[in-house]
Image (cartoon, helix red, strand yellow):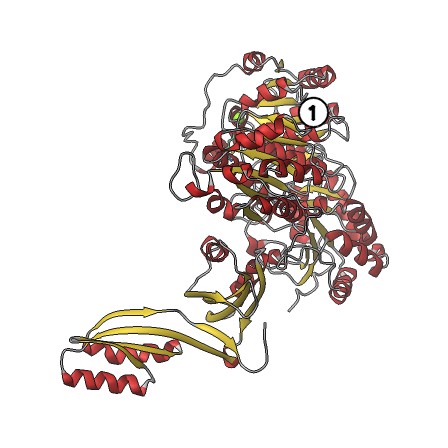
């Protein structure tokens, strides 16, 4: 069998039926093999979109997403998507063409050191120097990408290795003696954590992307009810806990909800699950959860103690540990009764205001109309910037894997191709991408892909004609010196979409988002809605270097509750050691 | 935070292309200090052993160990206790030795330090010395006055005393 055919065979062995790719000289052998294989190949219009689509596919489905790019510029174009997947622990396998082995190191045409470039942004990488290495490397790549803390794996495939003949083995054996991805959690340590948790009077749970990856949302729900702890999430954890639940605090952090940021400050025990305490989540770490004993559950031991000092580390799979903890802990609701009552009261006192009948449209109102149009199973992706934070702050997510966003890398241009990948993974679900006008323009060429392959995603462009998030910082911290963040008047997004044969709508007044989005989803066609919004609305935020309670900007709430006082009655128990 | 000190980290890794790059890349990328790194085949087929000397407090060391362990080809990592570790470095020193007097002095010094003269030319001597980095530093200090022309050091490599293995 040829190396190129072995790649296809390996993909089939792994249950892969769709890939996102873009061909090139060194990939001719592989593409020739794809020609008469059953593999579904989606030709994107930029390799970055192939990587983001594979990532979106993975995040929506939990399966490994696969992207392909040629050597040199193809591989470098993939890197932004690979780094995005790396930062958010998404299982992606990237297949990169490489120049023939005898040319490697000679600065051959379209040669780039793909392994070297991707080393810091992959979980692992391989280079096949012999076709016999392809089956075990492919198998290892999928195994590594999808187990433990998931992440992207790159396979570098020189042209001559794709062409060489070999005997495909009956069974593919892999050997990874240094890789031990599954950990159950130390039972003694779990007991200790349970002891800490049942003593807490004011516990808060912080759920990160790890809860979603490990599929432990049901356990999280049980756990929260059992101990009487409200749940706040990171951006990556959004959807792990239903945000309309009375114990949901929504997202915390720089652009987080007031209720979350204040209760983190107040809590006496913080149970963090599958999160890495990024600076966007914690604000100034020295002021983070100052009164709390911190229990940290994570499958990656290196995350424990990396950014925040932890009192009780629990290394292992979140689901296994939560199941174990639930068994250990008897009902703790009596002890936390007062706290829960306070949480509910405080929460309803600072529900962010969504309803505005202004013209131009307020972003909050846009998010509200989107929320009212989609259903629980609709997959929402976001781009990066204000659009992302409007969604993160104001959109109510209820189910895991339905809110997809580039958290760690903050990659503009992610939202639309990720939506494309999600739709390919789950064609039955509606998929809506909420993008900024700047970010969407970075990847708009892939409107061609969704048209050609009939991938009916709906793109909502939050059109403020600004690089809004950067402009917000300029307004707040740089004396309103709007340096190069104004985008001007072009393009006309409706015409742009039409040029690609994509349905296009424009929404400008309250009610129109709901109407057009509804039409777009119903149409079953790839669509774009140009939503003209007020460019001057800013997000509430915690300035960099500040603690979470030092939020600035008016926090517009839905319902004013007079005389609301933060709950301080129970003296915080002494912090460990 | 606990104090900064030099740590001797030993790691068993799969002997494959790119492993050294992964390890050294990790140190630069995460801002870990690295004084030296040595690598060579181990007693096990296909496995190499690395010795890394790094400076940092306990917290940094913990991160280094954990991050190293995440590299797929890294099998085992240990921070060796300096008290129960034998540390050795090899150093070659070429020094100026223009006359009889300087030669015999240099040879005497080398003997005291259990070094060996491994090359002689009309105007220079080359000394090979193995030992702890301190000992090597001391010899280099002594030889400074003769005019050292070249120093080549391997960086320390280490093994734990007694029957312990990793
Ligand atoms: C690829 C990339 N380049 C630059 C940035 C920095 N950045 C973050 S948000 C932002 C503005 C985004 O503008 P837009 O897409 O219009 O979204 P808005 O904030 O207006 O909603 C920029 C430039 C980034 N995150 N990603
Ligand atoms: Mg914008």
Residue A30 in percent (x, y) is at 57, 32
Q: Is residue A92 or residue A347 the one in the foreground?
A: A92
- Residue A416 against residue A198 in the figure, above or below: above
Quarter where residue B156 is shown: bottom left
Q: Quadrant of the N terminus of chain A?
A: top right
Q: How many marks?
A: 1
The residue sitting at 53% across, 26% down in the picture is A443
* Looking at the image, residue A509 lies above or below residue A34: above
Q: Looking at the picture, tell me which residue is in the foreground, A61 or B57.
A: A61
Is residue A538 at least partly visible in the picture?
no
Residue that mark 1 sits on: A370
Placement of the C terminus of chain A among the 4 image quadrants: bottom right
Q: Residue at x 25, y 81 (%)?
A: B142
User: At which x and y percent is residue B14?
Assistant: 55, 60
Give the chain letter at badge 1: A
Determine whether A150 is above or below B105 in the image: above
Point out residue A137 in the picture as x, y percentages from the top left corner: 61, 47
Q: Position of residue B115 (x, y in %)?
A: 32, 82
Q: Secondary structure at mark 1?
A: helix
Taking the spot 55% from the left edge, 47% from the top edge, the residue there is A126
Choose top left, top right, bottom left or bottom right for residue A67.
Answer: top right
Q: Residues within 10 Å of mark 1 (few under 14, many from 20)?
A: many
Q: Nearer the viewer, residue A353 or A162?
A: A162
Answer with left or right where residue A466 lies relative to residue A4.
Answer: left
């Amino acid at each position: 069998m040829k190396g190129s055919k072995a790649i296809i065979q390996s993909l089939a062995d792994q249950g892969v039926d769709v890939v996102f790719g873009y061909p090139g000289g060194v990939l001719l052998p592989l593409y020739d093999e794809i020609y008469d294989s059953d593999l579904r190949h989606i030709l994107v219009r930029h390799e970055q979109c192939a990587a983001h689509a594979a990532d979106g596919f993975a995040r929506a489905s939990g399966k490994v997403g696969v992207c392909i790019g040629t050597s040199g510029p193809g591989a470098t174009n993939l890197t932004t998507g690979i780094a995005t997947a790396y930062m958010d622990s998404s299982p992606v396998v990237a297949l990169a063409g490489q120049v023939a082995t005898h040319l490697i190191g000679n600065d051959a045409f379209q040669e780039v050191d793909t392994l070297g470039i991707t080393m810091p942004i992959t979980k692992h990488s391989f280079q096949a120097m012999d076709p016999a290495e392809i089956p075990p490397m492919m198998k290892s790549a999928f195994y590594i990408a999808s187990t433990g803390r998931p992440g992207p794996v790159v396979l570098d495939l020189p042209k001559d290795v794709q062409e060489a003949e070999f005997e495909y083995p009956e069974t593919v054996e892999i050997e990874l003696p240094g890789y031990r991805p599954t950990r159950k959690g130390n039972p003694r340590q779990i007991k200790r954590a349970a002891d800490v948790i049942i003593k807490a009077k004011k516990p808060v749970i912080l759920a990160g992307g790890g809860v979603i990856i490990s599929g432990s949302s049901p356990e999280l729900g049980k756990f929260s009810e059992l101990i009487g702890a409200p749940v706040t999430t990171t951006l990556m954890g959004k959807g792990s806990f239903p945000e309309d639940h009375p114990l949901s605090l929504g997202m915390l952090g720089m652009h987080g909800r007031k209720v979350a940021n204040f209760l983190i400050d107040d809590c006496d025990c913080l149970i963090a699950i599958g999160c890495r305490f990024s600076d966007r989540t914690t604000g100034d770490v020295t002021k983070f959860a100052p009164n709390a004993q911190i229990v940290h559950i994570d499958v990656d031991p290196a995350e424990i103690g990396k950014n925040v000092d932890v009192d009780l580390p629990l290394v292992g799979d979140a689901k296994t540990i939560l199941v174990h903890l639930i068994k250990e802990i008897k009902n703790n609701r009596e002890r936390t009764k007062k706290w829960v009552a306070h949480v509910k009261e405080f929460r309803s006192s600072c529900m962010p205001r969504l309803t505005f009948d202004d013209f131009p449209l307020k972003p909050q109102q846009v998010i509200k109309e989107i929320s009212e149009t989609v259903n629980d199973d609709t997959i929402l992706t976001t781009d990066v910037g204000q659009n992302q934070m409007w969604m993160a702050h104001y959109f109510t997510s209820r189910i895991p894997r339905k809110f997809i966003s580039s958290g760690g890398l903050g990659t503009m241009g992610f939202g639309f191709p990720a939506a494309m990948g999600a739709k390919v993974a789950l064609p039955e679900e509606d998929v809506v991408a909420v993008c900024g006008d700047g970010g969407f323009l970075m990847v708009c060429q892939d409107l061609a892909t969704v048209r050609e392959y009939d991938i009916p995603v709906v793109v909502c462009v939050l059109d403020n004609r600004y690089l809004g998030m950067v402009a917000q910082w300029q307004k707040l911290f740089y004396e309103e010196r709007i340096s190069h963040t104004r985008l001007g008047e072009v393009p006309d997004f409706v015409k742009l979409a039409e040029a690609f044969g994509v349905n296009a709508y424009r929404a400008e007044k309250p009610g129109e988002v709901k109407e057009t989005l509804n039409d777009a989803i119903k149409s079953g066609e790839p669509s774009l809605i140009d939503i003209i919004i007020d460019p001057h609305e800013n997000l509430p935020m915690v300035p960099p270097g500040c603690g979470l309670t030092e939020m600035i900007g008016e926090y517009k709430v839905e319902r004013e509750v007079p005389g609301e006082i933060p709950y301080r009655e129970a003296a915080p128990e002494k912090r460990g050691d | 935070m606990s104090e900064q000190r030099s740590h001797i980290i030993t790691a068993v890794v799969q002997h494959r292309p790119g492993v050294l790059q992964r390890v050294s890349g990790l140190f630069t990328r995460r801002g870990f200090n690295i004084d030296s790194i040595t690598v060579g085949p181990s007693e096990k087929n296909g496995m190499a052993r690395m010795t890394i000397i790094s400076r940092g407090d306990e917290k940094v060391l913990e991160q280094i160990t954990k991050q190293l362990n995440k590299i797929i080809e890294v099998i085992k990592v240990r921070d060796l206790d300096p008290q129960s570790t034998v540390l050795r470095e090899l150093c070659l020193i070429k020094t100026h030795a223009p006359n009889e007097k300087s030669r015999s002095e240099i040879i005497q010094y080398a003997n005291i330090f259990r070094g060996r003269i491994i090359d002689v030319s009309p105007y220079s001597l080359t000394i090979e010395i193995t030992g702890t980095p301190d000992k090597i530093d001391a010899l280099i200090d002594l030889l400074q006055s003769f005019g050292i022309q070249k120093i080549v050091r391997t960086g320390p490599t280490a093994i734990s005393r007694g029957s312990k293995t990793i």
